[in-house]
Image (spheres, rainbow, N blue to C red):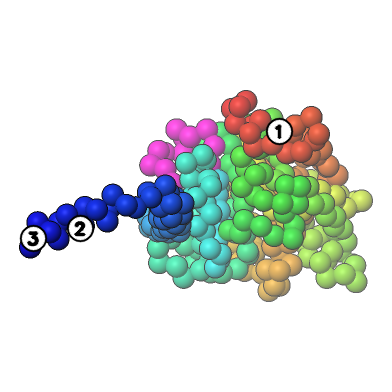
Amino acid sequence: MFTEYFTKLKGYFLSIDYRRLIPLVFVTLLLILSYTYRQCQYTTPYLQISLDKTKNSSVQLSNSQLTKIIVVSHFNEDLNWLALYIGDKIPYIIYTRSSDSLINHAIPVNKGREAVAYLRYIVDHYSNLPSLVAFIHGHRNAWHQTDPSDIVVALRALRWNKYGYMPLTSTMTFAFFHENSADMQSKINFQLWKDVLQKELGPPPRGGIKGHCCASFVARKEEILKHPKKFYSSIIDYIIASQFSDQLTGRTLEYTWHMIFGQPAIVHFKKCDIFYCDDKEVISVKLAEKHQ
């Protein structure tokens, strides 16, 4: 009986046209591969950034051994994009204004916005800064991040070390510094400059400033060290102690970073002067990686 059953089963399999099964097998393999890819894409970065946030850095080297680093001002942003797109390209360190216990470099008082995070890094590492420091926010995209619209592209396509200061966005801004202005921001700009910036930078610019917006930029070590450590710590102290909102005092720093790091009051960098561009003047990460 068993022999008869086996013979029927063998005849059944021999009668199948296996060519008809090829599309089904192909689709099944695609589904398996797609599922596996999604697991890698969503699970791996989470694990990676958790490890990175615990030690607060993507590298184990000391700053003085690095040629460049990214300083991230974090509040409550999702930082997974850092490990996924930046971590294996450019080392980074995170300073947080949140209560996230995974990030070691915490700022005790949440006042000063990204300015205090940047200044804190400079003060903490003043004696062993890397050659180039990029200062950025914790978000990957924002209204002020334009041309390129993605900070990942900006960081990876940048002509690192071309200038002492380089913005990471093409969005422009302007500000005035008037003691008796009806505009509160202009008054705070003047007061902060007079109290903590004037000793190093001279009197506030009469015609105001015009520069690249919103405090995402790269500064060369030599430009940072042109001012004493006390200069940077005094700005932190001033902002923390100020009776005014850090929306005002923090914004004054947004307007003045380029002057702190050696640029004139009015500055406008051409896109393809600071980023690698193709022959159509489109920013190109591929070209940057070829040159670097």
For the residues labelled 1 and 2, the Cα–Cα distance comes to 70 Å
Q: Residue at x 85, y 55 (%)?
A: 174
Marking on residue 2:
3
For the residues labelled 3 and 1, the Cα–Cα distance comes to 74 Å
In this rendered view, identify the residue nearer to me: 28 or 160: 28
Task: Please state the extent of the stretch shown in magenta in the rendering.
Answer: 55-69
Q: Earlier in the sequence, mark 1 or mark 2?
A: 2
Residue underneath mark 1: 276
Dot in front, 1 or 2: 2
Q: Earlier in the sequence, mark 2 or mark 3?
A: 3
Q: Position of residue 137 (x, y in %)?
A: 61, 56
In this rendered view, identify the residue nearer to me: 113 or 87: 87
Q: Residue at x 72, y 44 (%)?
A: 167
Indicate whether 11 appears above or below 274.
Answer: below
Residue type for callout 2? Lys
Q: Position of residue 97 (x, y in %)?
A: 53, 65
Q: Earlier in the sequence, mark 3 or mark 1?
A: 3
Q: Secondary structure at mark 2?
A: helix
Q: Secondary structure at mark 1?
A: loop
Residue underneath mark 2: 8
Q: Residue at x 82, y 52 (%)?
A: 172
Residue type for callout 3? Phe
